[in-house]
Every structure is written in C-alpha cells, then in structure tokens.
Image (tube, rainbow, N blue to C red):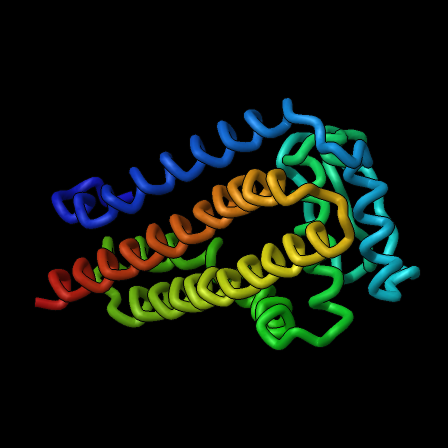
Amino acid sequence: MFYDPTFILVLPALLLAMYAQFKVKSTFSRYLQERSQAGLTGAQVAREILNANGLHNVSVERIGGQLTDHYDPRSGTVRLSSHVYDGTSVAAVGVAAHEVGHAVQHARGYVPLGLRTSLFPVASIGSQMAFPLFMLGFLFSVDMLMLVGIWFFIAALGFQLITLPVEFNASKRALAALQSGGYLSKAEVPKAKAVLSAAALTYVAAVAVAASQLIRLLFLRGQRRR
C-alpha cells in the first residue's frame, strides 16, 4: 500500500529481509548435507534433551513443509519438519535442539516467552487490522482511524521485539545442550550455530521492516494532518 516516495524508508529493511531469507535457506541447505558424527536424528536428539530436562510429557511430532519447525506451548509439542525429524545432519540436530529450547523456556517460566504468548492475540489482530484501518483513515482523512491503525501496528511490532530475546535464548540453550550432551563435536558446534544465527537474522529483519513501516505510517499521518 501507499507506493509513494516514502516507500524508500522501508526499502533498506526489505532488502535485509530478502537477504535474511536467502541466508537462512542457503545455510540450512549447506549443513543439511553434512551428517553429524553422533548420527542421531533430530527427533532422537529432541527426545533425549527433553528427557534430560525432565520434560517427558512434551511430545515430538513430524510436520510437513520445510523450515516449519516450531514448539506449540498449547499442546506441549515440539513439531519438526521431515528433514529435521528424520535427518542426522548438523542442521537437523541444531534446529531440533532450538525448538526444544523453547519447550525448556516454557517449563522454566522464561518471562519473555510468557509475554510473547500473552501478546500474541493482540499482535495477531493488529497485524491484520493495522494497514486496512490506517488506509481508510488516510483516504478519508479520519485521523482517529489512522491513529488506531498505528497503535495496532505498534502492538505487532512489540510482539516481534519480544520475539528476539526468546529466539536468541532458545539458540543459546540449544548449543549448550548439544555440546554438553555430546550430540555435536567441538568442530560441529560452530556449524550448528551458523544455522541458528541465520535463522535469527530473519527475526531481526522482521523487526527492521516493522519499525521502518511504523516510521513511514507516522510520516504519512503527519502529512495528511497538515
């Protein structure tokens, strides 16, 4: 929406987002081909790390797609894509451990994860309603609608900001568990870290895009109110 000169405010962040997507796919594909020395599958590693943390009630399931791996706190389930669930690669083991990191966060009452879960309903509505409301307000010069759209957008941005420490912490927990448990050798740990760092860049890029879009909306509202 609003392909006007202010779109240049968002362009650098969009380029970063494109690079981040390329980086995560290329890095994942690269280390998906490199079998870990331990030879365990992502599902096996996930199960063992969960058990080591006393999370016997958390299940590990296969899910379709690629890079669709996630932890569902509502059902207490770590869901892994086929390449990760059945894979014995450095990338598969790293991603599996990362998702288990979220399960451990949940069990330990990690505050940022709780905040993100609480903010999700508002952020979900905000991400869907922010632009339509702002657009209506902008087109019909209704400042209140523009303002409500901006506040919805701020809620969505807040969700993305809280996501950063959640993801970084999950990766930190994953790498520590992989190294201490002997699931990856000392030479393999940096490779798993490269996969998780590339994934983290996508979240950083998402924040950058949202922040630049917010600045753009504020600028457009200021122009319309003159």
Report the side of 37 relative to 31 (left or right).
right
Report the side of 104 relative to 207 (left or right).
right
Residue located at (60% from left, 55% from top):
171
Task: Please state the horizontal and vertical placement of residue 188, each as a whole percent of the image.
Answer: 62, 39
Where is 123 relative to 174, above or below? below
Q: Do we see residue 71 in this rendering?
A: no
Number of numbered labels in the structure image: 0
Residue nearest the viewer, comparing 89 with 20: 89
Q: Do we see residue 117 in this rendering?
A: yes
Task: Please state the horizontal and vertical placement of residue 213, each as a whole percent of the image.
Answer: 29, 54
Task: Please state the horizontal and vertical placement of residue 112, each as a whole percent of the image.
Answer: 58, 72
Residue located at (65% from left, 39% from top):
68
Location of residue 121 by image quarter:
bottom right
Residue located at (24% from left, 53% from top):
139
Q: Check the image and name the residue furthest to the right.
A: 56
Q: Check the image and name the residue furthest to the left.
A: 226
Residue located at (16% from left, 43% from top):
4
Task: Please state the horizontal and vertical placement of residue 58, each as a whole percent of the image.
Answer: 86, 58
Quadrant location, the N terminus: top left
Where is 160 relative to 96, above or below? below
Quadrant location, the C terminus: bottom left
